[in-house]
Amino acid sequence: MTLLQIDAAEKTYATAEGPLPVLRGVDLRLDRGETLALTGESGSGKSTLMHLAGALDVVDAGRVLIAGQDVAGLGDAGRAALRRDRVGLVFQQFNLIPSLTVAQNIAFQARLAGRFDADWAADLAQRLGLSDLGTRYPEQLSGGQQQRVAIARAIAARPALILADEPTGNLDEATGDAVLDLLQSLVAETGAALMMVTHSPRLAARLDRRLHLSHGQLAAT
């Protein structure tokens, strides 16, 4: 089953110097149980592509389907529901809720989706080295700890589609490997699909497929 289908996607942003084309006819398929590494230089459009894939934005032309649903046909509420029910997002900004503890942040999306499992959340916390931090708040954590909380929150609801933008960027190599192990285990256990942006050739090589984004277009590597 194809969980993510992107056909001839185009995205252009307005700038002071005029229109800036970021994506130029991007085609992509990601099937259940598949892992994909997305690479590219800074400014190549990787984050734009991830936002489109996660229903955070819509294409100017082409289409994006998540689990068969055309994102462009949904309003803001529909896209929010799709993200809640189907997508686990890990972005570099973390976006943790300051007023919630680590444990509450991890549980947040799973509770919204009606799929909170206390044993699974505890297992995630243990595997990510967060078990002793459950009562702390985001401001009391290091950047690497916050990143691990964001990863746990994204996968606590066992999403069908996991989109991770440099999920190991603030982590040491051993912890980064452990995070990728966890993401790959989730894919294997649940049949989810993973697309991960990374600048690490070593980590990219561990995934099933590798695509490189350059000048708004994708090519296999």
Image (cartoon, rainbow, N blue to C red):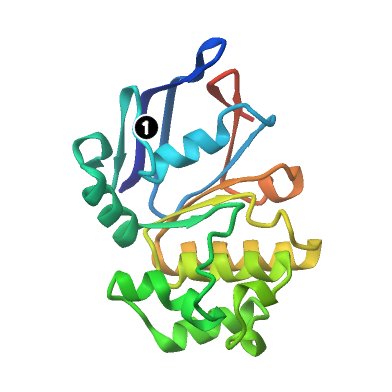
Residue type at tag 1: Ile
Which image quadrant for residue 70?
Answer: top left
Q: Is residue 71 above or below residue 168?
A: above
Where does residue 221 sit, x and y in percent of width and height? Answer: 64, 30
Q: Please, what secondary structure does the residue beneath circle 1 have? A: strand
Residue 157, visible in the rendered structure: no
Residue at left offset 58%, top offset 59%: 94
Where does residue 186 sit, x and y in percent of width and height? Answer: 49, 67
Which image quadrant for residue 119?
Answer: bottom left
Q: Residue furthest top?
A: 18
Please name the residue that numbered disc 1 is placed on. 6
Where does residue 117 sit, x and y in percent of width and height? Answer: 38, 83
Q: Is residue 70 above or below residue 183?
A: above
- Answer left or right for 211 relative to 73: right
Where does residue 181 sit, x and y in percent of width and height? Answer: 63, 66
- Answer left or right for 43 relative to 8: right
Residue at left offset 64%, top offset 64%: 147
Label 1 CA crowd tier, 10 Å (few <14, some 14–19, many 20+): many
